[in-house]
Image (spheres, rainbow, N blue to C red):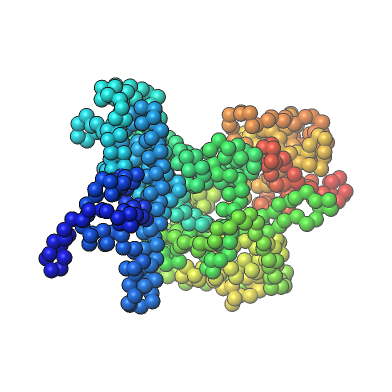
Amino acid sequence: MKKASKQRDNLVKCVTTTAEASIKEAVHRKADSKLKGLVENVDLIAREAWYHESCRKAYTRKEERHTPKYGSKEERTEAESRKSVQSAEEEAHLKAFQHLCKYVEEHIIERAHVIRMTTLTETYCNYMRTHSPQFYNKNYKTYRLKSKLTNYFQSRIRFWQRYAGISYLVYSDEIPTGQAIGAAFENATSEERTVIEAATVIRRAVQDGLNESPRLPWPPGDNDLRSDNVNLPELLTKFLNFLYAKDGKPKSEQCQLRVRSTGQDICYNVSKGKWKTPKHILLGMCVRHLSGNTHLINILNRHGHSVSHSFLLELETAICDSIQTYSGCLPPSIMPDNNLITQFCWDNFDLNEETPSGSGTTHSTHGIVIQEIKEQPYIPQTLPEVDKKKKRSISCANQQLEPCFINPKVEPNILTHTTSLNKSIDFKVEFSDFMWMLARMEINEDNQSIPGWNGWLSNVSHCDEQPSIVDYMEPLSQPITQNSTVQEVLKISQKASRAVGQQFTLITFNLAVAKMAYSLVWQHKQLYSDVIIHLGVFHKFEPDEKVLVLLPMSDNKLVMQLKGPYRICKIQSNVVYVVDIDGRFCPLHVNLLRKYKEREVSCAVSHSPASTDTVGDWPFTEFPLQDPAPQQDRSSDGMDDTMPFCAVACVAAVTEDGGEEFGSQILTPSTEDNRS
């Protein structure tokens, strides 16, 4: 060793036990595997070890003595912290190396196994990842570990490499080289051994991918749950490509979908559910909303295809908390600065739960917003993140709405003279409307093939179609049949329209709510001068179309059940249809009918045809097939409250056992109405 004065130190022989003890203590403290193989279990005095005295002093000097006693307190604290971390890392590597040495002693020296150097490196890295993940390095060099093993075991083990680029074979010094090569050849040609090694490599790749995968925000957004955002490990993807495609290049979209699906299953199950992939979250959420069956979701979870039901409840609760934290009057998917046109649709949302008295059921008001943007790209707002808690319920405060009183005799102001800003556009619109009326008048109403006004405009207009943005408005916990609720809906819609920079507020109601909204707008003309109310299109069926009919059950007349399918024979009015039910032609209100879709029968679908007794118990009126007598009011308004014999509000629910139940609340009129 050279000093500053350029003088060389002479070699000194180790002749004292103090010097020997200081060297061994320093080797153990620093976890110096290179020197440990040279001095451990070796009598340095007897072996006549030589060293430079200055080198021995520098090596055995304790690190605490080098802690800087100058500088600020923060600098000294940082230096001490850095040294403690370095010491902890050295201790972790020392334990991993000791574990590997025991493995080599047991398998290579005692059992005379031949093991590849890459396998030993994997064993070393796996121990570090399990016991000291903060110091784990997946790119740990194999040659470093080989050097440590050489210094520790010296001539007890040997390394053999067939040619450059191939992993070394490690075997005991006690077995001949030929025998070691033969054993290695047997291991290389064994299919079972190949499968085990492939599984080990893929498992390590998945665990590395879990550590490198970005943190999933809570709650996750739409972009976070896209399948193309999942960075599957490259080795896993290559393995699945060769598994599904002979040449390792899947060409069909279906094959690529299976690769992504199977890859996400492997990542989720190997990580024991720690890696939440989009497939497992979306599949569980989809099954939950389609069936609501907890047992089905848990079955998928036990087989590794979905997250648990409790996780889905926590996710939905987090979404609710995030929406409540969001302070904007618009949903996050609506763009306030790129608006072309925005309109709102509000309606009632009733859950008629079964209660002993029939009261206390859920009646709320829900709305959706539909927006068309001017130009791409579509950049939605993001919801704020919330703390991840195992919370599965949310508390909602009762909304106190401002009282509202409507004058039932208020009338609108009818404009007799209008001024057009562009007469050429007026002429085109009037001409299109006139052609639509002519086409509708030329065809009999019973065989009408010309669509309504909205459908006519959609067919004759020529414009670039783009998908609309649809999202939910914040619901109201009050029924929409109250005046105060309608008033609050108008105010919310006005505020949202101003937020997107729109001059007018476009709202769609059904006729019952529209009557209340019109009265409110006419009563407060200045306050709601920018509100334009539209009537929603009523549900319609065509003759010979198959429908399901809401009928009472045979064992309980107060419980309704959808039965069918039955054929529609004739349209009596816009809200009354004549249906053939087992040879009886019965006029039914549209509220009792549901669209029927043909589908394959599976084990989860049970057929329950309506019996004659069930139909007979229902107060039907026979209806002849010939044309009915002209009615006084042919232009029915599509009201839900114009039922000829009863009004039924029904809600369908899926039970926990997977079967369907249809409970209903029957609002029976007076006896005189039934007689009529």
**Res. 258 in view:** yes
Give percent across and percent down for residue 396: 67, 63
Question: Quick one: 293 or 647, which is closer to the camera?
Answer: 293
Q: Residue at x 37, y 69 (%)?
A: 78
Q: In which quarter of the view is residue 308 placed? A: top right
Say above or below: 294 vs 567. Answer: below
Say above or below: 286 vs 624. Answer: below
Q: Locate residue 521 relative to residue 5 in the image: left or right.
A: right
Q: Locate residue 448 relative to residue 513 in the image: left or right.
A: left
Say above or below: 58 vs 93. Answer: below
Q: In which quarter of the view is residue 166 placed? A: top left
Q: Residue at x 50, y 63 (%)?
A: 384
Give percent across and percent down for residue 252: 36, 33
Question: Quick one: 301 or 479, which is closer to the camera?
Answer: 301
Q: Residue at x 47, y 54 (%)?
A: 216
Q: Residue furthest left?
A: 6
Screen quadrant of the N terminus: bottom left
Question: Quick one: 415 or 215, which is closer to the camera?
Answer: 215
Give percent across and percent down for residue 382: 47, 61
**Res. 423 in view:** no
Question: Quick one: 469 or 166, which is closer to the camera?
Answer: 166
Q: Locate residue 74 relative to residue 504 in the image: left or right.
A: left
Give percent across and percent down for residue 350: 70, 53
Q: In which quarter of the view is residue 533 placed? A: bottom right
**What count of labels does the image hold?**
0
Q: Residue at x 34, y 63 (%)?
A: 62
